[in-house]
Image (cartoon, rainbow, N blue to C red):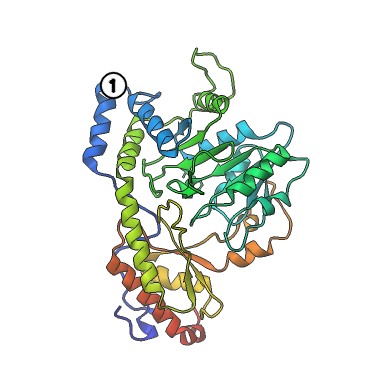
Amino acid sequence: MRKHKVDDLAHYGGQPLFDSIRSISNLVRPDIETFLHYSKMFFEQQQYTDHGVVESLHEKRLAAFHEVRHCVSFCGGFWGLVMAMKSLALPGRNEVVMPSLTYRRLADIVAWAGLTPHFCEVDPEQLCITGETAARCINDNTALILGVHPIVNCCDVDGLEALSQRTGIPLLFDAVESVYESYKGRKIGSCGSAECFSMQSSKLFNAFEGGYVTTNDDALAAKLRVLRDHGVDEDGRMVLPGLGVKQNEMHAAMALAALDDVERQVADNRKRYYAYRRFLAALPGIRLREFDESERCGYKNILVELLDDWPISRDDTLKLLNAEKMLCRAYYSPPLHQKKTGYEMIHGDLAQTERLAQRFLLLPCGYFVSEGDIEQIVGLLAFIYQNGAEIRDRGLQ
Ligand SMILES: *Cc1c(COP(=O)(O)O)cnc(C)c1O
């Protein structure tokens, strides 16, 4: 790390730490030959979409991976979530209980499904919805509980499943961030009524774009298959108001190549995570969110908390890091209930969420971040910590 004085920070005109962007996206690149191998399968069949040989194999492989009866693929995670919400929401009711400290598009997806977000608090230790925080928002108009797995480890599956059973309200999971994980030894994919995943290119499984829903419910899987195919059933009859949101063969070929590569990806992610853990251990004011290694973990995200003795705000820290060509992001800021949207949202006091939304940030990770980069990144954080008083005095424009 070649910075000696505050003027050397790129924000104040110094040379950026990196020449090219270091991103927080996983940016997986599967083996091209494997991708071409799967692509030839559909090319030779001359079937490019409508659930040909590759997409069928992709659904089978993913169902096996998640140890669940059904995988229904979609052209994106967004539409998988919309269709699952529409299928599961209790009729005559329209509220979805969900966290506000979560993925920035999630409330939009609920609105697209014609439902109303009702935001609940998160548990301050787990950073996510729990059976207890969700229970406080249940009322006569609750149509669905939307559990979201956080970015490190899984959410309170047992508590949410118990709440769902007790109230008779269906439980859907956004499991995008826990695609590789297990909960109490059980693979993520079979929890609640259904779980939704994304294969957008920044996720652990890169299919360019894509998503899927897993479930053990035969009727739900059949309904989702009809809904993604224009509402038309196997006999060609229009039975539901559906959409054209199916996966195509080329994206499925990429998904299979990514799936073949996932163990290597996770092993690489683990090395990066250990490097961060080793370097960050010596640095005060900042704490790494640790993966629970008694479970399966994908080690995908590097999430840190700025503690009370960190000298500058999280947002100012982000400004400094971004200027150094590190595309770091706040861990959910603003929380969804503080965003301006054109649709109705319901919430009570969310003080915990608002406090937590100021404390966390994601550090660069994934395929293109080396161990040397990690040493530089932590070195820069140490420099900010040591020069905190001077940075605070100068301020950030
Ligand atoms: C990316 C993401 C989605 C949406 O997936 P797309 O395939 O991009 O539509 C939903 N939930 C979470 C938590 C995500 O990270």
Q: Secondary structure at mark 1?
A: loop
The answer to which quarter of the image holds residue 323 is: bottom left
Position above or below: 267 against 328: above
Residue most toward the right? 140
Judging depth in this view, the residue of 205 and 5 nearest the camera is 205
Q: Residue at x 63, y 58 (%)?
A: 122
Q: Provide the residue designation for mark 1.
A: 46
Percent position (x, y) of residue 257?
Answer: 30, 39
Judging depth in this view, the residue of 217 and 37 nearest the camera is 217
Percent position (x, y) of residue 337?
Answer: 65, 55
- Which image quadrant: the N terminus? bottom left
Position above or below: 120 against 354: above
Q: Is residue 342 visible in the rendered structure shown here?
A: no
The answer to which quarter of the image holds residue 338 is: bottom right
Horizontal arrangement in the rendering, residue 95 relative to residue 41 (left or right): right
Horizontal arrangement in the rendering, residue 167 relative to residue 255 (left or right): right
Q: Amino acid at mark 1?
A: Gln
Q: Residue at x 67, y 41 (%)?
A: 164
Q: Is residue 310 visible in the rendered structure shown here?
A: yes
Position above or below: 393 against 188: below
Position above or below: 195 against 338: above
Horizontal arrangement in the rendering, residue 241 relative to residue 275 (left or right): right
Judging depth in this view, the residue of 210 and 154 nearest the camera is 154
Percent position (x, y) of residue 156?
Answer: 59, 51
Percent position (x, y) of residue 333?
Answer: 56, 61
Label 1 neighbour load within 10 Å: few <14, some 14-19, many 20+: few
Judging depth in this view, the residue of 310 and 47 nearest the camera is 310
The answer to which quarter of the image holds residue 109 is: top right
